[in-house]
Image (cartoon, rainbow, N blue to C red):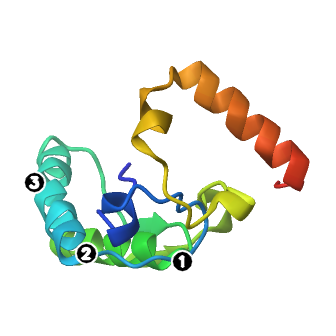
Amino acid sequence: MLRHGLTDWNIEHRFQGNTDIPLNDAGREQVRGALTEFAALASDGVPVDGVVSSPLVRAVESGKIIAEGLGVPYLGAYEGLQERGFGELEGLVATPSWWRMPAAVRTRRLSRVRSLWRVP
């Protein structure tokens, strides 16, 4: 399983969620770099019949790069793989102080914000 390559919002520390942000050039290179791992699985006898992704453009492009590199079909997007939404947080920058907080605190704060905004 591969998440997706880098986007400009990743670099900017923005909450992406299910906002449809494309890969950047570095992200495309990251995905191409992951091909060696997938090729190693195939050479170890793990069957790779095709690739699916979430419907977000960054995941679709990542999936297509992997499929093409392995010579298998890209089978399409599956809604169940789409990233969790962050509601009104999407597009906002997570400040350095946000990342210094313990993960449990960040999770509680996000949960509280999501419940206030009724984010699914």
**SS at circle 2:** helix
Alpha-carbon span between mark 1 and mark 2:
18 Å
Of the pair 22 and 10, the residue shown nearer to us: 10
Name the kind of residue labelled 1 in the image. Answer: Asp
Q: Tell me which residue sits at (72%, 63%) in the image.
A: 88
**CB-based contact (under 8 Å), mark 1 and mark 2:** no
Q: Quadrant of residue 109?
A: top right
Q: Which residue is mark 1?
A: 20
Name the kind of residue labelled 2 in the image. Answer: Ile
Name the kind of residue labelled 3 in the image. Answer: Thr
Left or right of 66, for residue 36: left
**SS at circle 1:** loop
Q: Where residue 112 is drawn, which disc sits there?
A: none
Q: Which residue is mark 3?
A: 36
Q: Tell me which residue sits at (15%, 40%) in the image.
A: 44
Q: Which residue is mark 2?
A: 65
Going from the N terminus, do you reach mark 1 or mark 2 first?
A: 1
**SS at circle 3:** helix
Label 3 crowding class (10 Å Cα cut-off): few <14, some 14-19, many 20+?
some
The answer to whether one can see residue 15 in this image is yes
Q: Quadrant of residue 4?
A: bottom left
Label 1 crowding class (10 Å Cα cut-off): few <14, some 14-19, many 20+?
few
